[in-house]
Image (cartoon, rainbow, N blue to C red):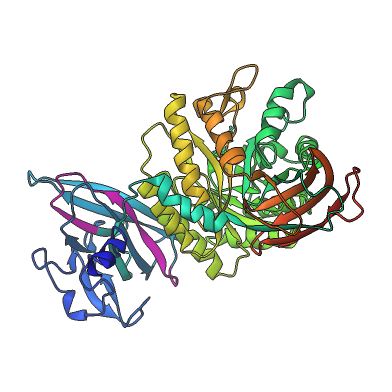
Amino acid sequence: MLVLWVTLLPTVLSVELLKDADFDSTSTYGGDETDGGWWCVQCDAVPSTDKHTGSHSVKVTNRKQNWGSVTQSFKPQGDHKYSFRAYVKILNLAQGKVYHSMETLLEIKGSNGNSKYEQIGTTPHLRPGSWHIVGGDYHMPNDAQEVRVYFQISEPQVNYLLDTASVEEIPHITDLKSDTSGRIDTLRKNNINIKVTNNNVNPSGLTVEVHQTSSEFGWGSAVDANDITDSQHKKYQDYFYDNFEWAVLENALKWYSMEPSQGQDNVALPEKAVDTLRSKGITVRGHNIFWAVAQWVPNWQKQLSASALKQAMVKRVTDSVGHFKGKLPHWDVNNENVHGDFYAQQLHDPDISIWMFNEAHKAAPNSLLFLNDYNVVSQNDATVAFEDEAQYVLGKGAPLKRLGIQSHFNGQPIDYDLVKHRLDEVARVGLKMWITELDIDDWNENTKADKYESLLRLYFSHPSVEGVMFWGYWDGRHWRPNAALANGQNVTPNAAGRRVKQLIKGEWRTNESHPVREGQNLRVRGFKGGYTVQVKHNGNIIKTEQFTLGDNGVDLTISLSGSGSNPQVNNILVG
Ligand code: XIL
């Protein structure tokens, strides 16, 4: 019995590795480097009853250096991976600042006694008056003997409260395919029960064919607005329609494309692309209303006064979200605002994204509004910052409805333990997520195929993820051509393109054919989505029905009474 119980335990239990992680045993703060508890290095620590959880936080003041920080060390296991978190509230702003940034820094002592320092996460927008999340994750080197974690703000005059700290080991996934397959079955599939009745044709020779025609989970790609509409690019278009049901215009809806100089209006191209895609049954995401990174802000905006800029921003919401109202169910609002703050700085308004969310929501109340950022799962530096940004704007009542995780990977090997951990970390916000810009910049098509497969399995098996968008597919039109799924004049799928299609149109689609008898219950476990079911007699279609398989499953009774050889189509929507 005990043996069974032990083997059923997950590989790693969430064991807290810090002492007094919640700062409630207030006697532990006065420690030093040697006693293993909290230590305020180059600062003073006292308990505060202004807490995030429990009874106390620690108040850190009198920081004598920019690295002055409350800190603690523990003994890690070499080659294991750890997650670090804490909540922080800053108590003051340095002059001229609208917020401060906190770095989570590790000091790792190796077997030779030398230390190396690694920054594992930066939360850029700490505002006084709110608790913010800080932290990151780290893969320990083999010879790591001791690790000390620091929570630092560059300006020593900034005092802060810290609470609800935690260091936990990140579990290792030994076999990604088997680890994900059970969750994929539970999350993405449901039961279809089919019974054929009133069979007045010959009882032998009947078959039921179940064809999945669309997927509930969103599979899509970025497209070039011109190439997807221009008849010269038929092969580019065929590849798209053959693989995907969702699209996003790579550039044409961006402010710099739609209004490259003030007053210019380039709405015709994105409008044509959106209308063309929609007419073919494709759902289109809106990307993006504003872009927080200064490099992507049109130059004309950089010269405007704060009030003129604000006026242009009001117009931008009308020209983008308002103009496409009813056509674009998603919009990225202040793109990459973990990595930039152009509008916040220009307007001296640290909460400008909340205004953006509210304006966009007014312009198209049915569009789901997103935060959208990079290095959230592909690197450790923005995971917690993104989680914090989401939690902060939600706390201020912004109509944020979904989280967009870009997912641009470089050519390095991918650590799936960390990708999964980072997804779980962001999922703590409680919102559904989309992988909005997946690409893997790997010149080797075979390793690229393996990486796409593993990532898709992880994403498809995650309960918070609703869809995956590739950031382009053709090397002739790709910001990172090595990441493409198809190459050359003929848009020929490479190993990665073939693998992706085999998964999204093969393994994760339901197409089955079964011989049936009248009154027999046929049970098919299908992937959620839209279906056509055909009853055939000796190979001829005698009845066609359509249904949608969702969370409730489908019970379908197909009456063949009166059906001769002419197909009948009934539309029923269930589930
Ligand atoms: C990129 C496009 O792919 C390029 O063609 C363009 O020159 C710059 O923008 N994050 C985003 C996307 O949100 O809009 C970016 O797209 C890639 C990174």
In this rendering, would 560 be left or right of 439?
A: right
Eyeballing the image, is 4 above or below 305? Answer: below
Q: Position of residue 99 (x, y in %)?
A: 44, 60
In this rendering, would 115 be left or right of 172?
A: left
Q: Position of residue 362 (x, y in %)?
A: 73, 62
Quarter residue 433 falls in: bottom right
Q: Position of residue 161 (x, y in %)?
A: 32, 71
Q: Position of residue 428 (x, y in %)?
A: 46, 64
Is 141 magenta? The answer is yes
| Towards the viewer: 210 or 333 | 210
- Which quarter of the image is occupied by the C terminus? bottom right
Q: Is residue 124 visible?
A: no
Q: Which residues are magenta?
A: 128-149
Residue at x-position 64% and y-position 60%: 357
| Rendering quadrant holding ligand 1 | top right
- Which quarter of the image is occupied by the N terminus? bottom left
Is 321 magenta? The answer is no
Q: Is residue 283 visible?
A: yes
In this rendering, would 147 be left or right of 339?
A: left
